Image (spheres, coloured by chain):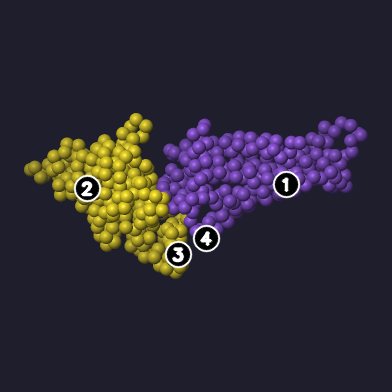
Amino acid sequence: MIAIEHISKSFADKVVLSDVSGVFEKGKPNLLIGASGTGKSVLLKCIVGLIHPDSGTASYDGREFFSADRDTVVAIRREIGMLFQGGALFDSKNVEQNVMFPLNVLTEMPYPEKIERVNFCLKRVGLENVNKKMPSEISGGMKKRVGIARAIVNTPNYLFCDEPNSGLDPQTSILIDELILDLTEDLDITTIVVTHDMNSVMGIGEKIMFLYKGLKRWDGNKNDITHSGVKELDDFVFANKVMKDLRKAEKL
Amino acid sequence: MITEFGRYFLFLGQLLVNRERFKTYYKLILDECVTVGIGSLFLVALVSTFMGAVTTVQTAFNMVSDFIPKYVISQVVREMIVLELAPTIIAIIYAGKVGSAMASGLGTMRITEQIDALEVMGINSISYLVLPKIIASLLMYPLLVIVAGVCGMLGGYLAGTLTGIITPDDYIYGLRSSYNPFTVTFALIKSFVFAFLVSSISSYKGYNTQGGALEVGISSTQAVTSSVIALLIADYLLAQLLLSK
């Protein structure tokens, strides 16, 4: 479980996050949603420590993160797997080397075990026989899946996904969503997904936090999101034509 | 300016904290040695050979008195190459080739979130990415300077003897006469300082790239400019400290 309290962040005069608090539960995907520029990715990066917030706290299963010493931060980070928006695969390494990277650097695992683990993770994300391909030789969806394989190879306790569906076709998006849901449930980990894709929200949104202009405006689950009574959230949810049509049909 | 200096020294401070195991760095250092050393060998040899050749021709051109023995030409060539041309001019070329590649490589890693990926894994990205580059530069640049020195003198020999400016015996005699071994020590001291400056400044500029592809190019240019300014200042300070009587 990850708990954040009163996180605020400004860049120069621009307030990006203002007093955001919440709890992200274990074993179910926690979604951070909102329109572009509302501070979702900044909040995610604050939680993993890539951006230092101006104020606030974050704790990983009771372990305070922001004020922790370097050793504790490193220890917590080694329990984190993260999927970046663009995949963030290492250009100079092939798929196998990318997935094996955390094992090479962070563990003393012998090579046969490492390769077995890499192949297991690649199979888990639905990729086989691509071990020797370079990142430039695979599609965007495959990059995302390799990114997920790399994120889970060291059996993380916490999984962060920054817009896992951006730039993907609807079918691949659904595959990625299902994969994130399955991994979260199977590994019983705390997963936070940043997205503005309503398909993802309705597909895997067990627990949702809605950000609007740096403020937390609503939290709940996918069953409550269509009748939240929050105007900004309604505007966001029903901006999608399919959702609009669905609402019309329900009213009829 | 002062803030930038402070950030640079903080950056250097991060190189040695929370390092990974030595085994992790071993292959990275070897890979970097191949990139910065072997990869620069041809250019360094080419440039230094021509520098030596041009220095010989120009020194001969400026020796207007017949009373000055011909072997002085190769003495001048030796001193110029060992003291200045090999360590300093090659350092400027090294900054242009290796420094810009370091900055653009790290800059691209920064904007594509590869550095963030390392940090999230709990890896000290500065130490992991930059330390091997600096160590490889410290190992390889002095060797490149030695190669440049040898090629420079060889280039001078070829230009001098093939055009009849100086006889082979005079050239060899000039190289060996009044030789002060400290000049080589001085050149090697400079090469270590220059290697550190170019690799660390270029890495700093690349690592701190913000923005997109355009900013990677800007970082790369800044890396070369800042490195060249730093090494020219260091060149003067080292000369003042170690050569002034």
Question: Label 2, on which residue?
Answer: A208
Question: Label 1, on which residue?
Answer: B185
Q: Nearer the viewer, residue A35 or B1?
A: B1
Q: Are marks 2 and 3 on the same chain?
A: yes
Work out how far the residue at label 4 is from the one at label 3, CA to CA, in angstroms.
Answer: 11 Å
Q: Residue under mark 3: which chain is it in? A: A
Q: Nearer the viewer, mark 2 or mark 3?
A: 3
- Image height of A223 relative to A155, above or below: above
Question: Label 4, on which residue?
Answer: B23
Q: Nearer the viewer, residue A83 or B132?
A: B132
Question: Label 3, on which residue?
Answer: A108
Q: Residue flagged by tag 3: what amino acid is it? A: Glu
Task: Find chain A in the image and tell me its colour.
Answer: yellow
Q: Nearer the viewer, residue A77 or B79?
A: A77
Q: Residue under mark 2: which chain is it in? A: A
Q: Are marks 4 and 2 on the same chain?
A: no
Work out how far the residue at label 1 is from the one at label 4, CA to CA, in angstroms.
Answer: 32 Å
Q: Residue flagged by tag 1: what amino acid is it? A: Thr
Which chain has been coloured purple in this picture? B
